[in-house]
Image: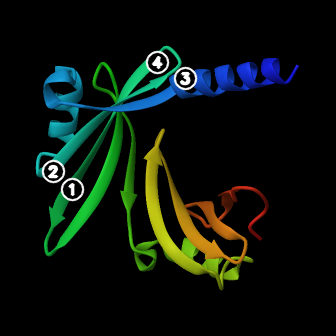
């Protein structure tokens, strides 16, 4: 019986890896539509690296790159469909650069006194959200806010 459990568990692990898998790919392996979409949207990008992501039968690409913005370097990641449609944009940002409504909501939450280890801005489907990463006594936590400061996701429990 134990052998059957081990075989089933192993098969499930292998299957889950194949359902959501990402592979770094050379520029020459990236469809022209994907490269063109990223280049058009971010003509000043540098250090671009592509990954091919498979989510079941759907294949899309993630481009990670840097943009110079005056004396600051921005780090972005965008997801692009195979036919060159930009699906989402994610950028690492300093906590201080988050909207006042998000900072205020975070400081008032139960994680307001936790050490902030990072923050990200995500644009997807015409909406912007902000993720605040914190280190707590129970481990790391990610809290996602909308642009008005409402909690969209608190990881494994309520953030307020």
Q: Position of residue 93 (x, y in %)?
A: 38, 68
State the quadrant of the N terminus.
Answer: top right
Among the 4 quarters of the image, the one containing residue 141: bottom right
Answer with mark 1 or mark 4, whichever residue precedes in sequence: 4
Among the 4 quarters of the image, the one containing residue 14: top right
Q: Secondary structure at mark 4?
A: strand
Q: Position of residue 80 (x, y in %)?
A: 34, 31
Residue 84 numbered mark, or none: none
Q: Position of residue 85 (x, y in %)?
A: 33, 27
> Real-space Cα distance between discs 1 and 4?
26 Å
> Which one is nearer the viewer's eye here, 68 or 114?
114
**Image side of residue 128 versus residue 139, left or right:** left
For label 2, count other residues whose C-alpha is less than 10 Å away and answer few (under 14), some (14-19) or many (20+).
few
Q: Are marks 3 and 2 in contact (CB under 8 Å)?
A: no
State the quadrant of the C terminus.
Answer: bottom right
> Real-space Cα distance between discs 4 and 2?
26 Å
Q: Which residue is mark 4?
A: 58
Q: Position of residue 150 (x, y in %)?
A: 67, 63
Q: Are marks 3 and 1 in contact (CB under 8 Å)?
A: no
Residue 19 numbered mark, or none: 3
Answer with mark 4 or mark 2, whichever residue precedes in sequence: 2
> Real-space Cα distance between discs 1 and 2?
6 Å
> Which one is nearer the viewer's eye here, 31 or 149?
31
Residue 66 numbered mark, or none: 1
**Image side of residue 94 versus residue 100, left or right:** left
Q: Which residue is mark 2?
A: 47
Determine whether 48 is above or below 50 in the image: below
Disc 3 vs disc 2: which is toward the camera?
3
Q: Are marks 1 and 2 in contact (CB under 8 Å)?
A: yes
> Which one is nearer the viewer's eye here, 16 or 141?
16
Answer with mark 3 or mark 1, whichever residue precedes in sequence: 3
């Amino acid at each position: 019986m134990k052998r059957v459990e081990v075989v089933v568990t192993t098969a499930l692990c292998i299957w889950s890896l194949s359902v959501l898998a990402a592979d770094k790919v050379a520029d020459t392996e990236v469809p022209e539509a994907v490269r063109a979409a990223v280049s058009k949207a971010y003509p000043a990008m540098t250090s671009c690296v592509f990954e091919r992501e498979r989510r079941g039968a759907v294949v899309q690409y993630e481009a990670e790159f840097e943009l110079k913005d005056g004396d600051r370097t921005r780090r972005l990641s965008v997801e692009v469909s195979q036919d060159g449609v930009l699906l989402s944009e994610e950028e690492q940002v300093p906590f201080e650069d988050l909207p006042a409504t998000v900072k205020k909501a975070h400081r008032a939450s139960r994680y307001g006194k936790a050490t902030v280890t990072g923050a990200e801005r995500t644009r997807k489907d015409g909406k912007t959200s902000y993720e605040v990463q914190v280190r707590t006594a129970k481990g790391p936590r990610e809290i996602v806010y909308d642009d008005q400061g409402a909690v969209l996701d608190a990881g494994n429990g309520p953030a307020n």
